[in-house]
Image (cartoon, grey):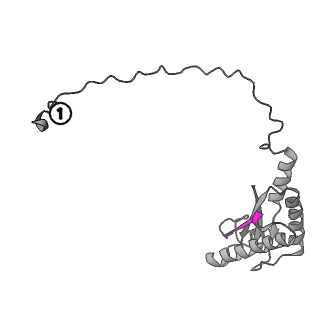
């Protein structure tokens, strides 16, 4: 008897009525935004303009390599010494070195060569006193040419290492 009378069942076809939730009136006006903003003078998230310019110069100054080489020229070592000086002045900044190649050679070969170029630049920065944990490397091989086209003038510009500041 308990099973038969335990639960009352709704009849088939009965619909339980529910009331829809109250809808709020849509906001058509802008909220009142008249309040004082805190001072941002000591905010460390803002980069001073002079530092922004130095960082842009740091990233624009690339080093270049001879055909099928990853050894550093005297000019490349000079540029890397300037970069090391900048990084020593700003110990909270990290850098990524991107190795690039011209279009000659297979994709796999150029990826490996681009990595060796980035690694040689990294090794020289470490030799100059930069913590290796602040430097990462990547190779793009021939995938991101600076100068499109074929010929020695274009190829010479594409055999390079670029530098990107990553922050801290």
Report x, y in % for residue 26: 50, 21
Q: Is residue 96 magenta?
A: no
Report x, y in % for residue 124: 83, 72
Viewer-nearest residue: 44 or 76: 44
What residue sits 65% from the left and 20% below the top? 32
What residue sits 67% from the left and 22% below the top? 33
What residue would you read off at disc 1? 7
Q: For this view, does 45 lie left or right of residue 73? A: left
What residue sits 70% from the left and 77% below the top? 113
Quadrant in the rendering for residue 22? top left
Report x, y in % for residue 30: 61, 22
Against 168, is 45 above or below? above
Quadrant in the rendering for residue 28? top right
Figure quadrant of the C terminus: bottom right
Considering every residue shown, the one lying at the far front of the view is: 2
Viewer-nearest residue: 113 or 48: 48
Considering every residue shown, the one lying at the far left of the view is: 1
Q: For this view, does 106 lie left or right of residue 125? A: left
Against 20, is 80 above or below? below
What span is colored magenta in the figure?
133-150
């Amino acid at each position: 008897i308990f099973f038969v009378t335990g639960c009352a069942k709704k009849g088939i076809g009965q619909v339980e009525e529910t009331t829809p939730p109250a809808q709020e009136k849509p906001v058509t006006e802008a909220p009142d935004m008249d309040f004082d903003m805190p001072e941002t003078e000591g905010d460390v998230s803002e980069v001073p303009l002079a530092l922004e310019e130095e960082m842009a110069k740091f990233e624009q100054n690339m080093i270049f390599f001879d055909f099928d080489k990853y050894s550093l020229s005297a000019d490349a070592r000079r540029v890397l010494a300037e970069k090391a000086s900048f990084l020593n002045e700003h110990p909270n900044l990290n850098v990524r070195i991107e190795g690039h190649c011209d279009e000659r050679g297979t994709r796999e070969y150029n990826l490996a060569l681009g990595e060796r170029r980035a690694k040689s630049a990294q090794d020289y920065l470490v030799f100059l006193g930069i913590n290796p944990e602040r430097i990462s490397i990547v190779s793009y091989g021939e995938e991101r040419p600076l100068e499109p086209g074929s010929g020695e003038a274009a190829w010479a510009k594409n055999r390079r290492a670029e530098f990107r500041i990553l922050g801290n």
